[in-house]
Amino acid sequence: MRLPPHPVTREQKRPSKGGFARKIDAERDLAAFIDRASVTMGRSEGMTVAAWLDLWIGSLHDHAITTREGYESIVRLHLKPLIGDIRLVDLMAEHIDSMIVLLQSPAYAPAGRTGNRFKGAKGLSSATVNRILDCLQSALGSAEKRDHIRRNPMRAVEKPHEENKQGAFWAAEQAAAFLDHPLVVEHPLYAAWHLALTTGARRSELCGLRWSDVDLDIGLWRLSRARVQRSSRVVEKRTKNRSSERKVFLDSETIEVLVAHRRRQAGARLKAGPAWGGGGEYVFVDEFGDPVRPDRLSRNWKSLVTRVGAPDVRLHDLRHTSITLGAIDAGLPLAVIMARAGHSRVTTSLDYTHIADEVARRASEAIASQIQQHRSGRVKGG
């Protein structure tokens, strides 16, 4: 039995394995190998990588819709056009290495994507290439598990190195100055910016927040849902992962800001009458009462930062700011920060760390106080 030819040299090699103490052990291992190879090749010999990718995508029933759509996009734009015609059993690490070179080539454009956007491009970034490879690794891992291939060739592939890009963040003084700016105070989404800074919530979590999730009497946000965007479509789903479902205690000023925001929203709803949409469920809405879209929240943020002349940071960087204020400025324990932010990994010991409600409540006050000490003491957003 021979392995498929090398994709470049076309050289064929016989598989070999040693280290057996007895001849009978070697013969048994060889017989088992031939049986496995015969089953695999008999069932999958004619299957192409493209055909398997279609089957694999169809099997992802338990994945979030956004995850599945992301995989579908990678398969359609990159994997099928570049390696889809290769037989699944013939796919080797060298094929994937060649694909990586092409993906990072300045001449590369995804299938069906042309125009000025790709003129003079530098090729895909290492981070994007690695997302493509992660998708392929999952697909081939499933093929290996189902005995369509003997070994996942991704094990022999070295992924491109990614630069460790640090997120930008504001100092406490900058955050306080922003929240005190008159244009910010009067902005309809002031409470969203305040909540992002004091809780470190993700954009999707802000967009998915409903009034029923918040108990303003005790200052508790039971965070379990998110609204995410794929192209032009917005989907509501559970939070990013299990650790993202969490209780976030709110400091006293944030509670007052949300109370003022709800009062303002009730007035807008009364004024709009039947034209008001959304049923009053969501905390952050547009002028028609519908839940604010993630892309619109980001556009509002970028426009406001430019208008007030604040240091240019992304909306997501408010999460970096909040975590930094808690960990560095307030000196809170890392376990408290991770539980509050909904992160799933730092050290294994975090999986065994349980944060008492009172400790989490003190964390909310400590983070907010880092901003409040630089402010006039007035409650904003009312």
Image: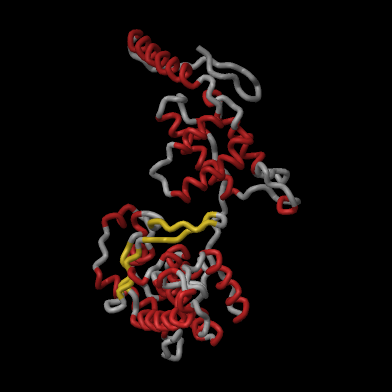
Tell me what residue is drawn at x 25 percent, y 61 percent: 354
Quadrant of the frame with the C terminus: bottom left
Asked if residue 364 lies left or right of residue 98, the reply is left
Q: Nearer the viewer, residue 113 or 340?
A: 113
Asked if residue 178 lies left or right of residue 260, the reply is right
- The x and y percentages for residue 172 are 47, 79
Tell me what residue is drawn at x 30 percent, y 55 percent: 351
What is the quadrant of residue 73 in the picture? top right
Q: Is residue 224 above or below residue 187?
A: above
- The x and y percentages for residue 164 are 54, 56
Asked if residue 293 lies left or right of residue 60, the reply is right
- The x and y percentages for residue 264 are 44, 83
Q: Is residue 296 visible?
A: yes
Residue sitting at the far front: 274
Q: Is residue 327 visible?
A: no
Q: Is residue 347 above or below residue 381?
A: above
Q: What colour scheme governs how the chains and residues are painted in the rendered image of this protein?
A: secondary structure
Q: Nearer the viewer, residue 167 or 37?
A: 37
Tell me what residue is drawn at x 41 percent, y 72 percent: 283
